[in-house]
Amino acid sequence: MTVPNKKVGAIVVGAGEGIRMGTSTRKQYMMLGERPVLAHAVLAFEKCDAIEEIFVVVPAGDDLFCRKEIIDPLKLRKPITLVPGGGTRQESVFNGLRAIDGQCELVAIHDGVRPLVRIGDIAECVRIADQYGGCILALPASDTIKTVDVEDRVVVTMKRHMIRMAQTPQAFRYDLILEAHITAQEEDYAGTDDAELVERCGEVVKVMPGDPYNIKITTPEDLKLAEVLLIGRV
């Protein structure tokens, strides 16, 4: 696989509160096998040859804890910068983009609570983003998708073959994703993911096949499933 001849950075977003997990420990710090969830995600980008530098966005005030408990035990070779998160995921990503400060031409943005991402998928996502400007991982919908109104009445049944369920990483040209975030901020617009902000600017975002193992850990059940998937992958 050809690696882009450009500097590529990664933003691993681990600044969430983890309210739906229902525990006192933030979900990104919970143990999955021998490492915290966030450590698994960071390690995947460390192992990916396409990535040169990693920016880890963590809750404000958690930098010393994350350095000691998450980063240092991994003994990483690549430069690591810890960035304080914002009040929302979108704000946290923007903080990560500002920390990059134009040092990278391409950037891959990943949820820190998706610990089972495949290294090859990271590299391929970056490669496609280099060609088209933006790329995301996504899975086809396996169930019938229906749009409903405020009273839970079906409005329309979606064409399932056109539906994709987005994952991360999502990779973009740095200038493109930075401008998309700035535009959203100026217009007070909150998107559901970074790709949506780029789409609003009329830019191309390509889709590549995602991985069913690349789950997002949100609930205790997700963590139990990740433990099973981790054993299966090993």
Image (cartoon, grey):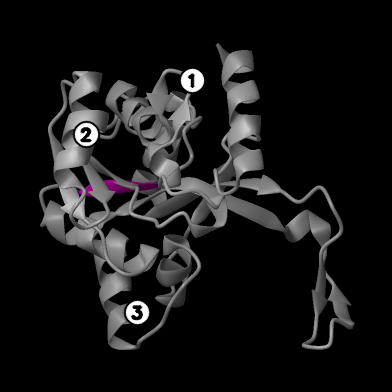
Residue 156 in the figure: left or right of residue 51: right
Disc 2 to disc 1: CB gap under 8 Å? no
Q: Residue at x 32, y 71 (%)?
A: 180
Q: CA distance from mark 3 to mark 1?
A: 38 Å
* Residue 213 visible to the viewer: no
- Residue 184: which numbered mark, if any? 3
Q: Which mark is residue 14?
A: none
- Give the percent coordinates (x, y) of residue 94: 26, 64
Lateral position of residue 212 relative to residue 106, left or right? right
Which segment is the magenta one?
A: 105-110
- The residue under the point 49% across, 32% down is 117
Query: Residue at coordinates 32% horizontally, 30% vertically from top-left?
Result: 45
Q: Residue furthest top?
A: 234
Q: Nearer the viewer, residue 140 or 93?
A: 93
Among the two numbered marks 3 and 1 on one chain, the one whose residue lies closer to the N terminus: 1
Tag of residue 33:
1
> Can you name the residue that lies furthest to the front here?
24
- CA distance for labels 3 and 2: 30 Å
- Element type at mark 1: loop
